[in-house]
Amino acid sequence: MDNSLYAAVDLGSNSFHMVIAHLSEGRFRIVDRIKERVRLAEGMDEQKRMSPEAMARGLACLSLFAERLTNIKPDQIRIAGTYTLRRASNAREFVSEAAMVLNHPIEIISGQEEARLIYQGVAHTQHIEGQVLVVDIGGGSTELIIGEGFDHKALTSRKMGCVSFTQSFFASGKLSDKHFSNAVLEAQHQLAPIINQYRKLGWQSSLGSSGSIRTVRDVLQGEGLTDGSITLEGLERLKAMMIERKRVDNLKLAGLTEERQEVFAAAVAILLGLFTSLPIERLEYSDGALREGLLYEFEERLQHHDIRERTAQALGTHYRMDRKQAARVEQSVLTLFDALQKPWQMEIEPYRAILGWAARLHEIGLAINYSGIHRHSAYILQHTDLPGFNQDDQALLAALARFQRKGLKLSELPALPNHDLQTVLRCIRILRLAVAAHHKRQDHLLPEWKVTVQGDELVVTLPIDWCEDNRLLMQNLEKEHRYCQEQGWPLLFQLG
């Protein structure tokens, strides 16, 4: 395998994209791009189920992508699913089949995370001066970000995309002022909750990063309506020109490709909603987007600037957590993980890092109250926007916090299809042991960890004198022993 190649795959509602990059001297250079229009959101029924035809198109595309990924190391590949895979009731079915085709797990990312990654893709590929508004119109959602440099200041994902708006407002193929007015009104409605915030922050320039925006720019320029920028005047003239053609299949416009023709009216309507609501004066096009953002996340992590670490630090600060206790538990879980990783055959990535963050944040639920802290912590971690975490990793983080103490009701463990169940359960055991051992919240209280395993049996060796001097803490550890015994997890404390 080529250690210098990295891949990012974006499973969008309209198209699937893949970029391959070569890493040299700490910087990425794009060496290949592949795009297939799959229309994954097309034909979704009232139960929010993707159609068999759409799923088949998606899997056929991914079989082609899989060929290109065979010579790239698995830990240098990221595959992200967006709006349709967040929303579809049968998304797990598709993701499971897709993961087998690709021989690689698929991350389902939240709308906020999608917006953050889009901004990173733009910021790393476009020179930005001052505050900038970035707009990305996808098949099922539109992301809007205000940022400066490499830092975002506002993120949002709105439920309006070129595929979903085509189905809602242009499914008949007719183009009329009424059809456009209804679509623009809905776009304005979707934008209403964020208008005041975005206007208050302001921006000096505007960039659009999606294929839909590129196509609108190309048509405006090709038809001589603008000089290459997107403007409200140009959009209004383009809308009038489209209404004159009366039907989508009559749209023979310079710069409009056949594959974009069906969803073009929806893209124009969404842009009209954006321009009139925010408002926007001029929108320029940027090549950078979600897949570039995924790539540059690799670069950040190679330079030890993991956004997830910053997220964990920010959460601890926001909730005013006891940093000393968090550090005690985190140090113990990482020590235990390192000692048990090989005998228990646990993958280091991503489990060591997520276990450490779970230890650091396990008491975040104290912001609500101590009673039921494990449930409160899990709720906060599951329902907070966590930049850098995909949905499965966020669910794992919350699950670890949920099972940190008390009785083990593993029937409440969520499905974690991208994670190894045995490793997850062993991470829960490690966190529980560390939490129980640090019950007295004192520095330098615990002896050096001495642990051994025989199969699934975990043996902790403690000095006799220490046990005599810490009888109350030993009672707490014995209680943890009973909880584990009820679950069929052998945990033994022996004197040595």
Image (cartoon, helix red, strand yellow):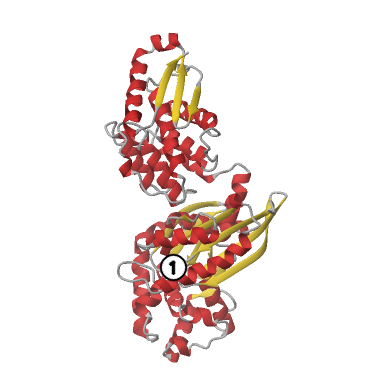
Measuring from the top left, give residue 280's x and y in whole percent.
47, 68
Q: Secondary structure at mark 1?
A: loop
Quarter location, residue 291: bottom right
Residue 409 picture location, percent across and down: 30, 38
Q: Observer-nearest residue: 443 or 5?
A: 5
Q: Position of residue 432 (x, y in %)?
A: 39, 30
Q: Which residue is mark 1?
A: 279
Total number of numbered labels? 1
Decide if residue 72 is on the left or right side of residue 454. right
Which quarter of the picture shows residue 494?
Answer: top left
- Residue type beneath disc 1: Pro
As rendered, which of 176 and 334 lies closer to the eye?
Answer: 334
Judge from the rendering whether residue 70 lies leftward or rightward of residue 372; answer left or right. right
Residue 120 at x, y = what percent? 55, 55
Single out the residue that lies furthest toward the right: 25
The residue at the point 46 percent across, 54 percent down is: 113
Image height check: is 386 above or below 33?
A: above
Label 1 neighbour load within 10 Å: few <14, some 14-19, many 20+: some
Q: Is residue 52 visible?
A: yes
The answer, for residue 204, to whether it is visible in the render is: no
**Residue found 60% across the figure and 47% down from its top:** 300
The answer to whether residue 483 is above or below residue 151 is above
List the single residue furthest toward the left: 371
Residue depicted at x 35% and y 62%: 89
Q: In this rendering, is residue 236 above or below 398?
A: below
